[in-house]
Image (cartoon, helix red, strand yellow):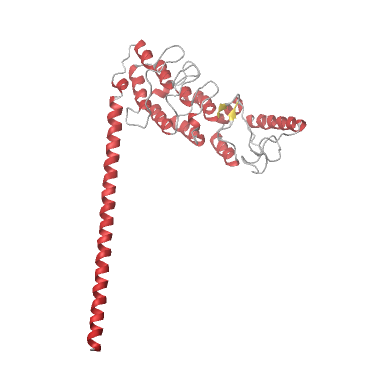
Amino acid sequence: MAYDPWWEGVYQGAHGDENDRRGQQRPRGQLQRTNQKEEEWLNAFEQGELRPGVPRRLRDESVAALVSQDDGLDTLRTLLARGMDPHIGVGEGTPLPVALLVSLMYLYDDGVIDEDEIRAWLGVVAADGSLAVADPSGRTVLHVLFGGEGEGEGRRVYDAEGRALVRWMVQAGADPDLPDQEGVTPAMVVMRRAETEAEAMDMLRVLNGSDGSDGSDVDLDRENAAGESVRSIAEGRGWRLGWIGLGWIGQRLRLGRRLRTRKGKGQRQRQQRKTRQQRKTQKTQKTRTQKTRTQKTQNRSYRQKK
């Protein structure tokens, strides 16, 4: 990636001249000035001033300032339109979707924003599997959403609207079975943070695809560093996974989808064969008609000459 000349600590565009070498080094003095200009750009951004260009990196304070702005979502779209990398690192390397959700969850738990607004923010940066990317500690957007950040966070996400948001995130690429560095998966966080068995089971059905959604098969017996699994955590709280543990409901629903898809595919294939046969028959009839007309014309000409 080659960068254009700097001003105000930014570069124009995410892609430079392909002929430039990606690893080209800048003079030390110029690099120091570049870092200083970048700090000035970030400081101005956190004060509400959007200067020309886009940053090479963001700070945690920059993301917090972005989500707190009334037009923050439009500002994010503007930066991406200018060429900012949607996979830009935040702080010590946190992916942008994770950093955004960490800041958004404070507003969400306070009732300032709802699930639709979270979906709008993440939808802007949910590209190329970015929702499945973890931070240096292995934490993903689902870990954060379910309340992995601190006590009380993620409380509202266990209702019907929250399950709809989770269903969308899984369909957008979030992995419900991806563990962090301690081996904790989002499903384990659900088992720990849900207040009631009904909340836990309903959310686990979404993650496991047992509700008819496109969820993945969650490993209920995978153990984390402490030797805990989804099943053991549930049993420790006196909950029974029931059919979710066997995956029977999910298998029936997925089998039904496959059968419906296969049936629809068979119907399309039969219709295509029928259409091809009709076209072939029409072509044959047309050829026969042309031959008959040609033969009649030749006979008429022969009789006239005779």
Residue 56 coordinates in the image, percent (x, y)? 64, 33
Residue positioned 34% across, 12% down in the render? 235
Instruction: From the viewer's perspective, tell me whether residue 130 is left or right of residue 58.
Output: left
Residue 118 position within the rendered picture, expressed as x and y whole percent measured from the top left: 47, 31
Q: Residue furthest right?
A: 29
Q: Which is nearer the eye, 57 or 193?
A: 57
Q: Residue at x 60, y 40 (%)?
A: 83
Q: How many marks?
A: 0
Percent of width and height locating residue 144: 48, 23
- Quadrant for residue 114, please give it: top left
Q: Is residue 293 above or below residue 153?
A: below
Relative depth, front residue between 116 and 95: 95
Above or below, 296 against 104 in this view is below
Q: Residue at x 27, y 29 (%)?
A: 252
Q: Give the side of residue 139 with respect to residue 269, left or right.
A: right
Instruction: State the residue in front, 82 or 73.
Output: 82
> Considering only vertical position in the picture, is 225 above or below 89?
above
Image quarter of residue 188: top left
Does residue 110 appear anywhere in the picture?
no
Question: Residue 262: x and y, percent?
Answer: 28, 40
Q: Is residue 46 left or right of residue 295?
A: right
Image quadrant where one finds the N terminus? top right
Query: Would you say residue 290 is visible in this rendering?
Result: yes
Q: Please identify the quadrant where the C terminus is shown.
A: bottom left
